[in-house]
Image (cartoon, rainbow, N blue to C red):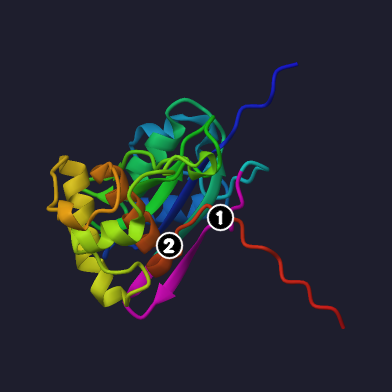
């Protein structure tokens, strides 16, 4: 008997464009409510029958929190946490259309995806290129000890001049954008070889640091938060 196909995952947390065109705003509200818009925008996403579930989908494959539009001091903000069926092209089309509704700085981390059919921790950070959201490459599967015998993250951070991921957001954000843009452009950033304590893959470790910083500053993670049980 064949196993069910694993769902994809989409996580976003970013401010919406201002002003948001009325057709896009109406479509976004409809999707948050779990239905297709009455007058869908001219985008390939809305030709897919599953489009109405991209913000509300749930599955046993991912621990998602649902999607909503929040009102911040700086304006409306879109928070997405959804599980998407493994329909070909659905995740990519969702990222493409939703990315166009967001207000982001160049190189900003807006969220992440987990591809369909992959394991639940296969996080791909989503970076704003100036025109669209683009996923970075995969992180090493640390469940299998992929970094065993390599350079430690502490040594790599010192060698690359990176702050600790738990530094204040005001310190992290500009460096996160610089690292993210270098990843998108496949550019090497300087690393002091003398400060390393083992073999290293620079691009992979930069992505690991970026993921740790995004988790600490923006809450982007695939980790399961254990439930706290209170006994009276």
For image coordinates 41% across by 49% down, the residue present is 112
Residue 144 spot, x, y in % from top left: 52, 39
Residue for badge 2: 215
Given residues 33 and 2, the one toward you in this image is: 2
Q: Earlier in the sequence, mark 2 or mark 1?
A: 2
Classify mark 1: residues with Cα within 10 Å, few (<14), some (14-19) or many (20+).
few
Residue for badge 1: 223
Q: Can residue 176 be seen in this snapshot?
A: yes
Given residues 220 and 45, the one toward you in this image is: 220
Alpha carbon separation for disc pair 2 and 1: 10 Å
The residue segment tinted magenta is: 62-76
Quadrant in which the C terminus is drawn:
bottom right
Residue 146 spot, x, y in % from top left: 44, 39
For image coordinates 62% across by 62% down, the residue present is 225
Q: How many numbered marks have been drawn onto this rendered protein structure? A: 2
For image coordinates 36% across by 51% down, the residue present is 208
Residue 143 spot, x, y in % from top left: 54, 43
- Secondary structure of residue under mark 1: loop
For image coordinates 31% across by 43% down, the residue present is 204
Q: Are marks 2 and 1 in contact (CB under 8 Å)?
A: yes
Whether residue 3 sits left or right of residue 15 in the image: it is right
Q: Can residue 131 be seen in this snapshot?
A: no
Q: Is residue 68 magenta?
A: yes
Quadrant in which the N terminus is drawn:
top right
Q: Is residue 170 magenta?
A: no
* Residue 230 in which image quadrant: bottom right
Q: Height in image: 103 above or below 100?
A: below
């Amino acid at each position: 008997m064949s196993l069910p196909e694993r769902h994809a995952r989409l996580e976003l947390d970013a401010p919406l464009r201002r002003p948001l065109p009325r057709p896009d705003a109406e479509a976004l509200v409809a999707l948050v409510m779990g239905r297709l818009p009455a007058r869908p925008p001219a985008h390939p996403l809305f030709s897919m029958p599953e489009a109405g579930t991209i913000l509300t989908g749930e599955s046993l494959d991912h621990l998602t929190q649902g999607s909503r539009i929040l009102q911040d001091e700086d304006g409306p903000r879109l928070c997405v946490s959804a599980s998407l069926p493994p329909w070909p092209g659905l995740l990519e089309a969702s990222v493409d259309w939703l990315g166009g509704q967001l207000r982001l700085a160049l190189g900003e981390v807006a969220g992440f995806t987990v591809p369909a059919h992959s394991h639940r921790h296969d996080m791909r950070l989503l970076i704003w290129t100036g025109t669209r959201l683009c996923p970075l490459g995969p992180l090493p599967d640390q469940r299998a000890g992929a970094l065993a015998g390599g350079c430690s993250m502490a040594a790599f951070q010192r060698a690359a001049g990176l702050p600790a991921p738990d530094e204040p957001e005001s310190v992290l954000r500009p460096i996160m954008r610089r690292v993210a843009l270098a990843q998108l452009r496949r550019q090497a950033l300087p690393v002091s070889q003398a400060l390393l304590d083992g073999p290293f893959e620079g691009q992979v470790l930069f992505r690991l640091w970026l993921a740790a910083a995004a988790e600490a500053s923006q809450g982007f993670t695939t980790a399961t938060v254990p439930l706290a049980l209170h006994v009276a």
